[in-house]
Amino acid sequence: MGWMPAATPEDLSGAVGDEIDRVFEAEDRAPERILFATTRLGTRDRLRNEVGFVSWEEGDGRAIVCETVDRVKGSESDHVILVTTEDDVSDSLLCIGVSRAISGLSVMAPAALAGRVGLSG
């Protein structure tokens, strides 16, 4: 479980690539076992466009899926990377996002939000 600071959308650009590399190398995860869950549609769309993530429907077993937390409710993934630049995310949305992870969780968020889920820099 880890936290990376992300207070602005620009902070996400480099951090996303670094975290994917870390999860691939350190945890030996296949792309289809990683889920990026965002709290906002705009963040989801930005990551899909900039990084090349796909939707659930486009997932082909070789790509990393990126969806909103609301959209992944009821599903699970080996490693979930919860992404938000907002620090006012509801506890309910946080709980849903965090609980999608089977064995690995990373959080990319402002420090205040990371603290709410028990992580700190």
Image: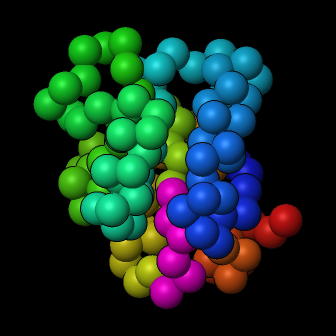
Magenta extent? 83-88
Please give left or right for residue 11 compared with residue 87 in the image: right
Of 116 and 63, nearer the camera is: 63
Q: Residue at x 31, y 50 (%)?
A: 45
Quadrant of the snapshot with the C terminus: bottom right
Work out whether residue 35 can be spotted. Answer: no
Work out whether residue 101 can be spotted. Answer: yes
Q: Residue at x 68, y 26 (%)?
A: 21
Above or below: residue 24 compared with residue 35? above
Residue 81, image x, y percentages: 53, 47
Residue 106, image x, y percentages: 63, 49
Q: Could you tell me what secondary structure mostly forms the magenta stretch?
A: loop
Residue 96 falls in image quadrant: bottom left
Please give left or right for residue 69 compared with residue 80 in the image: left
Please give left or right for residue 116 compared with residue 31 in the image: right
Above or below: residue 40 compared with residue 49? below
Residue 114 falls in image quadrant: bottom right
Above or below: residue 39 compared with residue 112? above
Q: Residue at x 64, y 71 (%)?
A: 7
Residue 8, image x, y percentages: 60, 69
Q: Residue at x 60, y 59 (%)?
A: 10
